[in-house]
Image (cartoon, grey):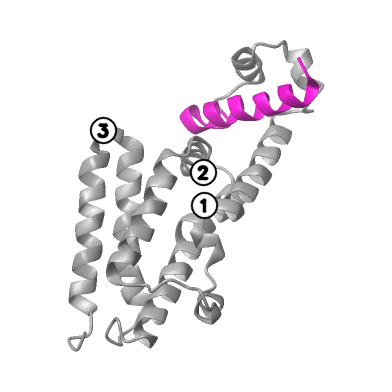
Amino acid sequence: MERGNTKQEILEASLELFSVQGFEATSISQIASAVGIRKASLYSHFENKQAILDALVKDVLEQYVEHSIFAKADWDQYEAAEDKPTLTPDAAAQMILGQVRYILHDPHISRARKMLAIEQFQNPELAKLQTKQNYSDVMHYFTGLVKYLIRHDVLTEDDPAIMAAQLCLPVSTWINLCDREPDREAEVMDLISRHIQQFFKVYRLETR
């Protein structure tokens, strides 16, 4: 098997195992067995289990920056774009629901999120990454969204950070619920859709 392919298979198998049973509970032997290679072959790609985790964190960050709308929250740039779509309440709802579906169904993102949930209390680096991806960046994105909608007279003016928290934090809770109970996804997506519509109903300017 080609060396580069084997290295990627090791990372994918490790992420799967770490997302289910955690870093400490996963052995090099288990990873090698999942890939179908000997431990000695695994060590020709990674010197130890920590090196695998380091490579995974780097990969998770790269995937996050490339695909997550929360990592690209530049509402000033959005506002300056000449060909930007009109951000109506329905358009905002569809954008949020589309990102939730992506978060739930992309295998790499889903496993990485579960790994961070498990490891956040054991690894300070992963705790910071968990806070960044699942709280700080999400709040930053939705605060920017709310400010944008206030500026454009879609939403009434109030505390943007609190409005953003009211909008996004229940969604994070429902995503966590789906991670634990995947069969409730249809229920969760309906709740998120109704939640977004209710948010706009509460804060939308009466003149619009």
**Residue that protrudes farthest toward the front in the picture:** 83
- Which label's residue is closer to the chain start, 2 or 3? 2
Q: Position of residue 53 (x, y in %)?
A: 66, 36
Q: Position of residue 101 (x, y in %)?
A: 38, 46
Q: Which residue is mark 3?
A: 183
Q: Choose top left, top right, bottom left or bottom right for residue 166.
A: bottom left
> Is residue 18 located in the magenta-colored stretch of the structure?
yes
SS for dot 2: helix
Against 155, residue 132 (above or below) is: above
Q: Which residue is mark 1?
A: 130
* Contact check, label 3 and label 1, Cβ < 8 Å: no
* Contact check, label 2 and label 3, Cβ < 8 Å: no
Q: Residues within 10 Å of mark 2 (few under 14, many from 20)?
A: many
SS for dot 1: helix
Q: Which mark is residue 100?
A: none
Q: Amino acid at mark 1?
A: Gln
Residue appearing at x 53%, y 80% in the figure = 76
Q: Choose top left, top right, bottom left or bottom right for residue 163.
A: bottom left
